Amino acid sequence: MVVWLEQTISSCGFFGCHPRSCALSILKSGSDQEEDGSPYKASEGSGSLDLGSPNDQGTHAVGVNFPCHGLVKPTGASRPAGEGREKVSCRSAELDLDSCTKEGTILSCTRSTNGRLNFFIQTVKPKDTVMCYRVRWAEFTTESFVEHGMSYKDSSWYGGAESSTQHWPILISGIQEPKPFVTTDVYSNRGGFGGILERYWLSSNATAIKISDSVPFHLGWNDTEQNLYFQSRYHNTPYKPPPGQQPFPELSYRVCVGSDITSIHKYMVRRYFNKPTKVPSEATFRYPVWSTFAVYKSDINQEKLLRYAENIKKNRFNCSHLELDDTYTSNYGEFEFDAIKFPNVSEMFKKLRSYGFHVTLWTHPFINYNSSKFGEGIEKGLFVREPTGQLPAMVRWWNGIGGILDFTNPEAREWYLSHLKNLKSKYEVASFKFDAGEASYLPQQFSTLVPLPDPSTFTRRYTEMAASFYERAELRVGYQSQNISCFFRIIDRDSVWGYELGLKSLIPTVLTISILGYQFIQPDMIGGNLYPNRTDGSPELPNRELYIRWLELAAFMPAMQFSVPPWHYDNDVIRIAQKFTALHETLVAPLVLELAGEVLDTGDPIIRPLWWIAPNDPSAHKIDSQFLIGDTLMVAPVLEPGKQERDIYLPAGKWRSYKGEYYDRTPMLLTDYEVDLDEVAYFTWVS
């Protein structure tokens, strides 16, 4: 039997009740105490139990009704007019009221119409401005599932995961049955969840939800009903119960309600997120990274690399480091240079150092079957295995078929790191670009030396490999990896204007992963990756206007990265690129470096949404084409083709534009604000 538990969270905090449901009511004003002072009541006639726990002033109450027959609403549970709310619905069997007990702030039940279960709701008030609710529903049958539905009507939601089509706030379309919430390469699988992912969502109505790590978590949605579905299950999924435990589904999470969206997010980050312990190399914040990938793809060799470096110097650009990407080895999974493509590696590195270049190398977790290292990997048991553990699990990735290293295995970790350290020592390599790492590259069923109940833990283990190279290392995946003190790169972009891996997706993606706790962000290559059939422009070059607008936006990100070079266009593009790399170095980098130091203590974003300084401004909740660097610099790039003007929203405060204009009658909307092709509109806060 299936029933629905509807919970409504809002700034007034009301959890309402539908027929045949269990409902939790949370009020931020008023009292549920009866005249005799009792904090709860039981009504056999209505089949309900109303549990109240007011504080000394009677200003907070919690009511729970199990189950409702008809529409039952706790005393004092009306919602003030105009208050927004979110609804959370729980699909489970009906609770057996005789099994429910209350002890302090915890109401628990041990049986439902399905049989035995473990259910509880606990109120926790960690501080005066925050109220949290711990919810847990655990079944004791292996083929069952637990599912809660959250309505996202009348509010804006943020967080969750990087995606191929990124919007800010989250834009849901279509219907999706709950699917495993695991890290996925969304360039190859555009319907998946991204490589940077956390079980955390945040609402403009000052509500935050954090799903527990132990849950075999699936996420679905229905745009018609405007619901998200949080589901827990083990059958038909890559999740596994911890060793020695039965595959009984459990859905547990916390819902925290605060006074505004900014303050509740700060509380959640400080309470639940890891934080980096170091700041990467200052040069990586100040100067551009130059990658060989978009301009050469795998057709790179010693001569082309040296010519690329010489042109960077010739055109008077600075460089944090030169990134040698795919393909410098003979086969994928090897750790030595291809002697044909790179006939004199030591001399090449010596020459690059004489030019002033640090060099980083591309790496990944795959060892292809035709690699000289594949046999060694099998012999030493270094690979993820098929479920029986007898044979290596062969996986397909974008460059072939091979084994994937098992980073739960200390021997595999040491083997991989020793090869990287050898390259670093032998050639004075500065660091590495760690590519891939998504759980989607694991087989549907697999085994590792240390069992992985959650496949995304593989991503976490892979990110740990970058920690010792943190100063100039680059990762493209993250799961519970905020304490890895490296730059995290957003997934490859196509050379297009739109929201699907295009220019318009950059700000929503950077804001999303910032909210998930990743602050040292590399926004990928200026102009995109220049993939065939995914490029606005010629097959050889991204569209010129697109390229210019892209580099202007990148200049206001924590780091810049070129691949397609400005000199492949014309002198005007070179001039614009020089202008904005200089602006990044002198204006942006000093502010970003100051904020980067604060990240170690607070975890607060470097790149912030407008609502960060205007948490109660509905207009600020929906703006996806502007952002803040800290609280004092607001950026509004042009992201539309053929445009040299745009609308700009100024939140409350005093602002001065890059042109010297002063605005104090705010909030206000500047319509058709002129921004020439070689400009970005930005505004500084006037204290």
Image (cartoon, helix red, strand yellow):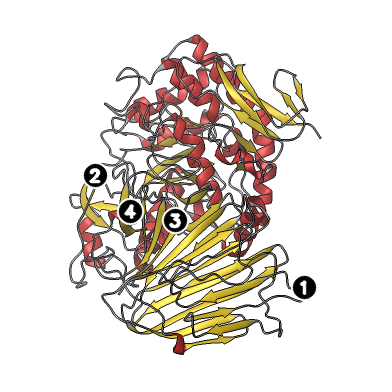
What is the residue that sits farthest to the front in this orientation? 45
Q: Amino acid at mark 4?
A: Pro
Q: State which quadrant residue 683 falls in.
A: top right
Q: Earlier in the sequence, mark 1 or mark 3?
A: 1
Spatial separation of the CA atoms under disc 1 and disc 2: 71 Å
User: Which kind of residue does numbered mark 2 sit on?
Assistant: Asn
Kindly identify which residue carries mark 3: 463
| Quadrant in which the N terminus is drawn | bottom left
Whichever of callouts 2 and 4 sits on the residue coming sooner in the sequence is 2
Secondary element type, mark 2:
loop
User: Which element is circle 1 on?
Assistant: loop
Q: Sequence order check: which comes first, mark 3 or mark 4?
A: 4
Residue on which disc 1 sits: 57
Place of residue 413 in the rendered image (x, y in percent of width and height, measured from the top left):
38, 63
Q: Pick whichever of labels 1 and 2 is earlier in the sequence.
A: 1
The three-letter code of the residue at mark 1 reads Gln
- Disc 3 crowd, CA 10 A, few/some/many (<14, 14-19, 20+): many
Q: Nearer the viewer, residue 334 or 153?
A: 153
Query: From this viewpoint, is residue 551 visible?
Result: yes
Tag 4 residue: 365
Distance Cα–Cα, label 2 vs label 4: 13 Å
Specify few, some or many for label 2: CA neighbours under 10 Å numbering under 14, 14-19, or 20 or more: some
Residue nearest the observer in this picture, 224 or 518: 224
Q: Position of residue 168 (x, y in %)?
A: 50, 40
Label of residue 610 in the image: none
Extreme residue toward the top, this view: 571
What residue is disc 2 on? 331
SS state under label 4: loop
Q: Nearer the viewer, mark 3 or mark 2?
A: 3
Callout 3 touching callout 4 (CB < 8 Å): no
